[in-house]
Amino acid sequence: MDFNELYMSKRLLPEEIAAQLQSGWSCCTDIAAAIPAGILNALAAGADTEERGSYILHTMLDLTPLDCLGPKATRNVTPVSWFSGGGLRDAINYGRGDIMPCYYRDMPGLFRDYVEVDAFLTTVSPMDKHGWFSTGAAGSNSLDLIRKAKRIYLEVNPHMPRALSAPVIHISQVTALCENDASLPVIPPAEIDEISRTIGGLIAEAVPDGATIQLGIGAVPEAVGLALKDKHDLGIHTELFTDSMVELIEQGAVNNEKKPLNRGKTVATLAFGSQRIYDFIDDNPAFLMLPVDYVNDPAVIARHPNFISVNAALEVDFFGQVCAESMGTRHISGTGGQADYVRGAIQSKGGKSFIAFPSTAKGGTVSRITPTLTPGAIVTTSKNDVDYIVTEYGIAKLRGKTLSQRTRALIEIAHPKFRDQLTRQAKSQNILI
């Protein structure tokens, strides 16, 4: 088989691929940099015409503006968010999109068992001499979507790194492909202010040499990463591969030599951030980009002793219920992998799970530690799983503590101007005994 001839026979324009998608189809993408913006924007260009019909679009973490999530296109394209970026967030809050409640670790199984995959649309690296494309920056759900899909449409991008262990697609499996020489989505470095730096330092003090780490999204997890530069023999087993992790590897703090699984290898299931990240994972034999149902499996996480998980939140109540995905009823993101790593870390020998955030919001006018969550707020991490809560005022250990003990510990790390008020509220609820 001449793979180049087969490639050319399947090469189309994005508009031609969009025209092949039929009304009523369930179309699926993977996450972040894997989302094929060229194909989806071509789909949006004709989505409001009668002859194009309507589509369901399953996607997650849109990093770049997508026309198919705008008000005009979503008359005929129904996006289903599995974890939202800005476009999906707006579509849902304005009643133009739907939500799939789930843990990140469960997504491949949900696609296998419950979701019709008429078309899998994804961005890949250029074809190699053997006819294979790499899904690059997304291990995530791609393997199961490849297996389940009735049709596979590729957007070939020379900027997509070839992650050596990522899922691959052979040209013989491809329905059609297009080319898009566009930079991959990047996000500006998190702005690490003094509060984030303080929180990062508090958590870093609790991280022993030889620990395996997972860091979430945002300024606080990035600050933790940067505060770990003086540690030794760290390992990385994480859903998201970040800029601070590249820094830790290049500085020598991470060598992955103490990990019992995938020793010597950095493990992740998706990557996004700066171009530095994409360059690092390209053709790197010491980097494993693997499916999320393995990477985020709490049983796999727990096999790493001294596992350290760091994630963020919007608010926490006296019980220790953590909300990280909504502001009351207003949709923000999704559960993602926070609960996966909380559960894995607390089952790890010597492991710790940290949920970290600044003590206040809205310019210091609102306490993020509250008697009860805002009405309608989604519980991301349950009171039964929560371990450590961290603000710039300290660390509160909640696991193994009673409600009264938890409440006192949380009030101690709340902003000082809210502590008396929180104490009065706790007493009025007969919590402090």
Image (spheres, grey):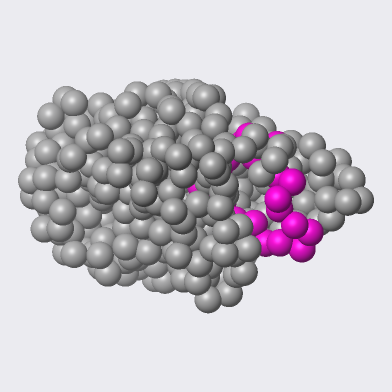
Outermost bottom residue: 113
Measuring from the top left, give residue 66's x and y in whole percent.
Answer: 68, 36
Asked whether, in this view, residue 405 is left or right of residue 83, the answer is: left
Total marks in image: 0
Q: Quadrant of residue 87?
A: top right
Instruction: Answer left or right for 377 relative to 355.
Output: right
Q: Where does the image place residue 384, in percent across and percent down from the top left?
A: 42, 71
- Asked if residue 173 shows in the view, the reply is yes
**Residue furthest to the right:** 50
Residue at 65% across / 37% down in the picture?
14
Q: Nearer the viewer, residue 336 or 330?
A: 336
Residue 29 colored magenta? yes
Q: Residue at x 65, y 34 (%)?
A: 13
Q: Is residue 123 left or right of residue 118?
A: left
Q: Is residue 101 above or below residue 266?
A: below
The residue lying toward the viewer, choosing from 222 and 201, is 222
Part of the protein shown in magenta: 18-41
Q: Position of residue 29 (x, y in %)?
A: 56, 51
Seen at 54% across and 32% down, the residue is 179
Which residue is rendered at x = 89% and y = 45% of the image? 49
Query: Residue 301 location in percent, x, y?
Result: 26, 61
**Residue 370 visible somewhere in the drawing:** no
